[in-house]
Image (cartoon, rainbow, N blue to C red):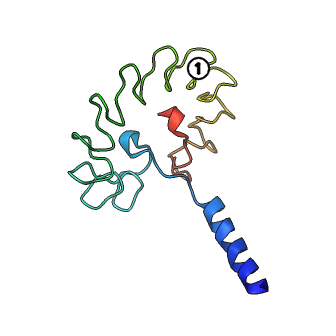
Amino acid sequence: MGKLKQILAAAAVLVLAAPAAADVCNCRGSAAPGGPCYAGPGGPAYDGPGGPAYSGPGGPCYAGPGGGAYAGPGGPAYAGPGGPRSRAPGGAADDGPGGPAYSGPGGPCYAGPGGPCYAGPGGDGRRCPAVCE
């Protein structure tokens, strides 16, 4: 039983320590081979048919009606009133101080050194929440 607890504890640490997956439809981070935004065949941001960032009909990044990147009313990328990407005060993507998409120092979308969206030297930008895109 003790060995099982050790294995489960180690697995939990690995899961919690792993960086968040990049938003491949609006990727931030290195586009070099091996990077989180590499768009070549087999890459995590490949936009070809069947790829994880395919933007054609039926693909996860399709911006037409019914697609995962549709920005019209009712779509997952809608930025109008009440939409999941609304930046109005109190909106799901409010980018004012204290808002879920605030990009100032200490904010969840801060792209400066040490911030979750920083992709410069020493950072990879992979901890940037999807609301920041």
Q: Amino acid at mark 1?
A: Gly
Position above or below: 29 against 9: above
Q: Secondary structure at mark 1?
A: loop
Q: Position of residue 13 (x, y in %)?
A: 68, 66
Picture quarter with the N terminus? bottom right
How crowded pointer 1 is (Cα within 10 Å; few <14, some 14-19, many 20+) is rated as some
Q: Position of residue 92 (x, y in %)?
A: 57, 25
Residue 6, by quadrant, is bottom right
The answer to whether residue 26 is left or right of residue 50 is right
Position above or below: 133 against 88: below
Residue 118, by quadrant, is top right
In the picture of the structure, the residue carrying the numbered disc 1 is 91
Position above or below: 124 against 81: below
- Frontmost residue, 112 versus 41: 41
- Frontmost residue, 21 versus 116: 21
Q: Position of residue 52 (x, y in %)?
A: 33, 52
Q: Position of residue 109 (x, y in %)?
A: 58, 35
Residue 97, by quadrant, is top right
Q: Residue at x 67, y 66 (%)?
A: 12
Position above or below: 41 against 123: below
